[in-house]
Image (spheres, rainbow, N blue to C red):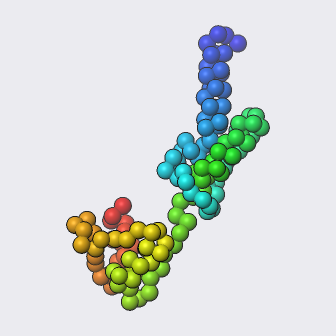
Amino acid sequence: MTGSRKKIVALLLASTLTTQLAACGTVFYPERKGQISGRIDPVVAIANGVGLLFFIVPGVVAFAVDFATGAIYLPGGRRAELGPNATPDSLNQQLYASTGHQINWQHDAVQVETLASIDQAQQRLLVAY
């Protein structure tokens, strides 16, 4: 093996081990840190599993870090439902019970609309994102 090939292989191995020790979930999805539970993201689990193929320790460390930080879990573990006669006050009560925060309905950034169907709500949410 020539000197340049050895350097490339060494650099590739070092970068692979570094990302495995940092844990794939925390590298790929840093916004997921802090989640407590949920469904496991198969992409992160497979990427961490690749570390197990190279060496046991980096793979185990990657899994441990991702489970400890919560980055291995898929987002959106909660679901909210409202009855057909929901009002801003009833919504505020449910939000406060779930999150501890209330909404100031008079704030300029808050828009309150009455929608005729679930389809309209889905369309509005898709436009928002």
Residue 41, above or below 7: below
Q: Splitting the image into 4 quarters, where does residue 7 fall?
A: top right
Residue 114 or residue 61, whichever sits in front? 61
* Residue 120 falls left or right of residue 4: left
| Total marks placed | 0
Seen as rendered, the residue at the extreme top is 3
Q: Where is residue 9 shown, x and y percent of the image?
A: 65, 21
Q: Where is residue 73 shown, x and y percent of the image?
A: 60, 56
Q: Which residue is at 47% across, 75% downward? A: 97
Residue 77, above or below 83: above
Q: Splitting the image into 4 quarters, where does residue 42 fall?
A: bottom right
Residue 58 or residue 123, whichever sits in front? 58
Q: Which residue is at 67% across, 10% downward? A: 2
Residue 75, above or below 117: above
Whether residue 47 is visible, yes or no, is: no
Residue 38 or residue 123, whichever sits in front? 38
Q: Where is residue 100 shown, x and y percent of the image?
A: 45, 69
Q: Which residue is at 41% across, 68% downward? A: 101
- Name the quadrant of the N terminus: top right
